[in-house]
């Protein structure tokens, strides 16, 4: 996670709840196209439980949006197992490689006035 310059700054998180378990990776994307790390509690999203993704700190340059990449769970993952109808392999040998093409992608805009979203 990026460091904060102001010790009074608070973390800004995106909290999402999903109807199926997924494996997920993601990045934050800034207005100038620069990418940043997306802090996640886990690379496994559990059914019905909020998953928090760290987006940034108050008082700093916030990203425009978050890009999330999803895969179905592997046999070794906890929770419900299911498969994708596309027929593509679930992953590359159980990993979440940066070069692997995800099964789904979600773009979530970061609101300009995020004060009410601070956790």
Image (spheres, helix red, strand yellow):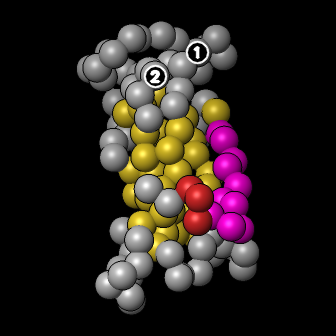
Q: Indicate the position of residue 78 as horizontal and vertical percent values.
A: 28, 20
Which residue is at 43% across, 39% downward? 51
How many residues crowd around disc 2 within 10 Å: few (fewer than 14), some, or many (20 or more)? few
Q: Indicate the position of residue 113 as horizontal and vertical percent values.
A: 68, 67
Q: Are marks 1 and 2 in contact (CB under 8 Å)?
A: no
Please say whether residue 96 is visible from this viewpoint: no
How far is the residue under mark 1 from the one under mark 2?
A: 19 Å
Of mark 1 and mark 2, the one earlier in the sequence is: 2
How many residues crowd around disc 1 within 10 Å: few (fewer than 14), some, or many (20 or more)? few
- Residue wearing tag 2: 48
Which residue is at 59% across, 58% downward? 116
Which residue is at 51% across, 31% downward? 17
Q: As rendered, which of 98 and 71 lies closer to the eye?
A: 71
Q: As rendered, which of 10 and 56 lies closer to the eye?
A: 10
Figure check: 62 above or below 68: below
Question: Left or right of 102: which side holds 4?
Answer: left
- Residue wearing tag 1: 84
Instruction: Tell me the magenta residue range.
Output: 105-114
Figure disc tally: 2
């Amino acid at each position: 996670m990026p460091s904060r310059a102001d010790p009074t700054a608070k973390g800004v998180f995106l909290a999402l709840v999903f109807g199926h378990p997924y494996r997920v990776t993601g990045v934050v994307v800034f207005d100038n196209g620069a990418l940043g790390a997306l802090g996640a509690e886990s690379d496994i999203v559990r059914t019905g439980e909020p998953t928090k993704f760290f987006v940034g700190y108050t008082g700093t340059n916030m990203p425009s949006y978050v890009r999330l990449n999803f895969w179905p769970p592997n046999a070794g993952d906890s929770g419900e197992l299911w498969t994708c109808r596309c027929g593509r392999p679930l992953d590359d040998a159980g990993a979440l490689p940066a070069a692997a093409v995800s099964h789904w992608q979600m773009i979530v805009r970061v609101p300009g006035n995020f004060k009410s979203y601070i956790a």
